[in-house]
Amino acid sequence: MRHIQEKFEELLEKHGLKKTPSRLSVLNILSSREVATSELYLEQKLGDKVNRVTLYRILKTFEGKGIIHKVLDQNGTANYAVCSPQCNEWHHHDEHLHFNCVVCNKVYCLDNIEFPDVKIPRGFKLESVNYTASGICKQCRKSADTKN
Ligand SMILES: [Zn+2]
Ligand SMILES: [Zn+2]
Ligand SMILES: [Zn+2]
């Protein structure tokens, strides 16, 4: 547990951010989850520890610094997930698949999937590509199996 805390402190330091307890708590929750996390979930988890405005600002700052990235689920709700180490203040490189489960609505960041090179027409400049997929996640398939 201790070295996880240190890892987060280092991450904040690397991005020139002050190591406030609120920022550390948000990082803690986001990285402890297998799926992308909504602001509402964070709010409920943090309770009175962090107020809404602070939370909003923390998410904006983290996103801008390349610490977390935003994923929209099928309802258009923003979810946040921790970035890959290649992300930085100027560019996000989260080129993985975002899998949105139609049953539980959770968004998974799926790494280790190969994508074809995206060829864009002349004159355009590619900055980022988002891969999204929807279907039924492992968890939901499992619980469907046990019910039948
Ligand atoms: Zn990123
Ligand atoms: Zn699911
Ligand atoms: Zn992701």
Image (spheres, helix red, strand yellow):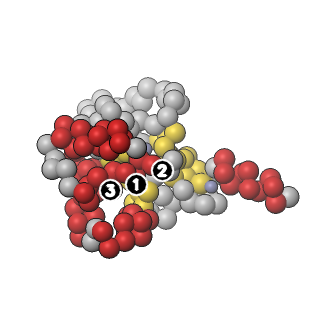
Most foreground residue, 118 or 143: 143
The residue mark sitting in front, 3 or 2, is 3
Question: Cβ(mark 3) to ligand 1 < 8 Å?
Answer: no
**Horizontal relation, residue 106 to residue 37: left or right:** right
How dense is the environment of label 3, judged by Cα within 10 Å: few (below 14), some, or many (20 and up)?
some
Name the image quarter holding the C terminus: bottom right
Q: Image height check: is 4 above or below 53? A: above
- Toward the viewer: 21 or 138? 21
List the residue tagged with mark 3. Answer: 25
Give me the residue at 32% from left, 56% from top.
25
Check if mark 3's residue and mark 1's residue have beta carbons within 8 Å: yes
Asked whether the viewer can see residue 71, the reply is: no
- Left or right of 92 in this view: 44: right
**Residue drawn at 73 percent across, 51 percent down:** 142
Dividing the picture into quarters, in which one does residue 129 lie? top left
Disc 2 is placed on an element classified as loop
Q: Do the residues labelled 2 and 1 touch (CB within 8 Å)?
A: yes
Q: How crowded is mark 2: few (under 14 residues within 10 Å), some or many (20 or more)?
A: few
Name the residue beneath numbered marker 1. Answer: 29
Vertically, is 37 above or below 87?
below
